[in-house]
Image (cartoon, rainbow, N blue to C red):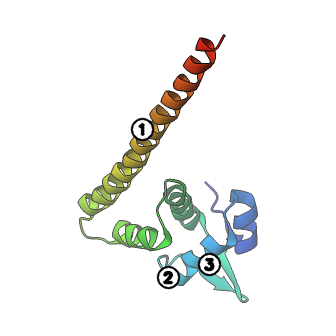
Amino acid sequence: MTEHIMTKQEASKHFNIPIRILDEYERWGLCSAVKKVMGKWQYDDSDLEKLSLIMTLHDVGFNSEEIEIYMRLLLNDKDTDKKQLDMLNEKRDAILDRIHFREKQLDRLDYLRYEINKSIKSKR
C-alpha cells in the first residue's frame, strides 16, 4: 500500500479537517511522524488516522483539552485502556444526562400542548 503524504492545506481540504484542529495537533506535538519540509507540515497515513480519531472525539463532544489528554493516553506505551474507557464512559454519561433532560422538556411541552388542545376542543 502506498503511503500518502499531504500538506496541512491538502489534509484539511481532502478530509474536511478544520485548520484550527490541525494547528492543535501540531502544537500538541503528539506525533513524531509529522515532518516539516520547506517550512510546511507534512502528514502521513499514521497522522491522518490519528486526525480521524481527533475529529471523532470532537464530534462526540470532547473539548480540545480532553482530546489532548485522550490522545496522550492513546500514544502512551503503558496500559492506558482503562483510563481511555473511563473518559469515554464519562462523556457517554454526560450525553445521556442531556438526553434525559431534553426528554423531560419534551414531556412538559407535550403536556402544555395537550392542555391547550383540550381547552380548544371544549370551546367548540
10 Å crowding of disc 1: few (<14), some (14-19), many (20+): few
Give above or below for 101 relative to 86.
above
The secondary structure type at the circle numbered 1 is helix
What residue lies at 56% left-to-right and 67% top-to-bottom? 47
- Separation of disc 3 and disc 1 at Cα? 40 Å
Give above or below for 85 relative to 67.
above
Callout 1 amino acid: Lys
What residue lies at 34% left-to-right and 69% top-to-bottom? 73
Which residue in the protein does label 1 denote?
104
Q: Left or right: 104 with respect to 77?
A: right
Q: Earlier in the sequence, mark 2 or mark 3?
A: 3
Callout 2 amino acid: Gly
Q: Left or right: 25 with respect to 38?
A: left
Q: Position of residue 117 (x, y in %)?
A: 59, 20
Q: Earlier in the sequence, mark 1 or mark 2?
A: 2
Callout 3 amino acid: Asp
Q: Earlier in the sequence, mark 3 or mark 1?
A: 3
- Separation of disc 2 and disc 3 at Cα? 10 Å
10 Å crowding of disc 3: few (<14), some (14-19), many (20+): few
- Separation of disc 1 and disc 2 at Cα? 43 Å
Which residue in the protein does label 2 denote?
29
Outermost residue on the top side: it is 124
